Amino acid sequence: MKPQTILFTLAVAALAAAAGWMAHGASVQAASKNVYEIRTYTCEPGRLPNLLARFRDHTTKLFEKHGMTNVGYWVPADGPLHENTLIYILAHKNRDAAKKSWDAFRADPAWIAARTASEASGKIVTKAESVYMDATDFSKLQ
């Protein structure tokens, strides 16, 4: 299977898992105008633990600070993507809010410091992909 096909399959599975999670009582700003963003990061060899630590210790809190809702974070269960891939989903009020949140996040001195510190021994992410999604009328994530 091609890497793009694997990533797409993982992304769909991640979103399905998020929908199941939501159905069991968790909330993600349940407004029908939410837009969801699925992001896939590919890391330099051996650097996924550094990326996970950065998200665990800094990034998720900064996302919330800037109006982004953390829906979920996943690492593929099987190799080779298990060794270098992080997939996550954020919720935004709308696309304009997403742009404003990302702009504020990227300019935040706390983010710049966390990124700089985590990359002191070298670059972590080689590729970042983002797809914005609108919930269907039958989705539990409206």
Image (spheres, helix red, strand yellow):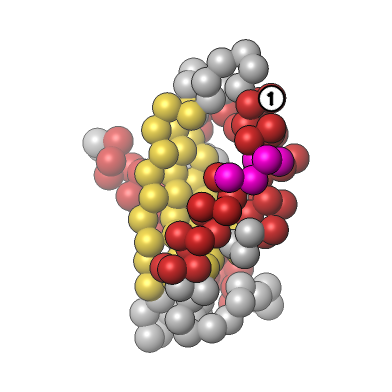
Q: Nearer the viewer, residue 131 or 2?
A: 131
Residue 73 in view here: no
Tally of numbered discs: 1
Q: Is residue 128 left or right of residue 21?
A: left
The quadrant in which residue 129 appears is top left
The stretch in magenta equals 107-111
> Residue 54 at x, y = what percent?
67, 35
Could you tell me which residue is drawn at 50 percent across and 68 percent down?
97
SS for callout 1: helix
> Residue 115 at x, y = what percent?
62, 31
**Up/down of 14 relative to 18, above or below:** above
Say which quadrant the N terminus sits in. Answer: top left
**Up/down of 12 relative to 141, above or below:** above
Q: Nearer the viewer, residue 124 or 85?
A: 124
**Up/down of 79 relative to 38, above or below:** above
User: Pointer 1: what residue?
Assistant: 117
Could you tell me which residue is drawn at 39 percent across and 50 percent down?
130
Q: Nearer the viewer, residue 106 or 132?
A: 106
Could you tell me which residue is drawn at 43 percent across and 68 percent down?
96
Q: What secondary structure is the magenta-colored segment mainly?
A: helix
- Residue 119 is one of the magenta-drawn residues: no
Q: Mark 1 is on which residue type?
A: Ala
Residue 126 in view here: yes
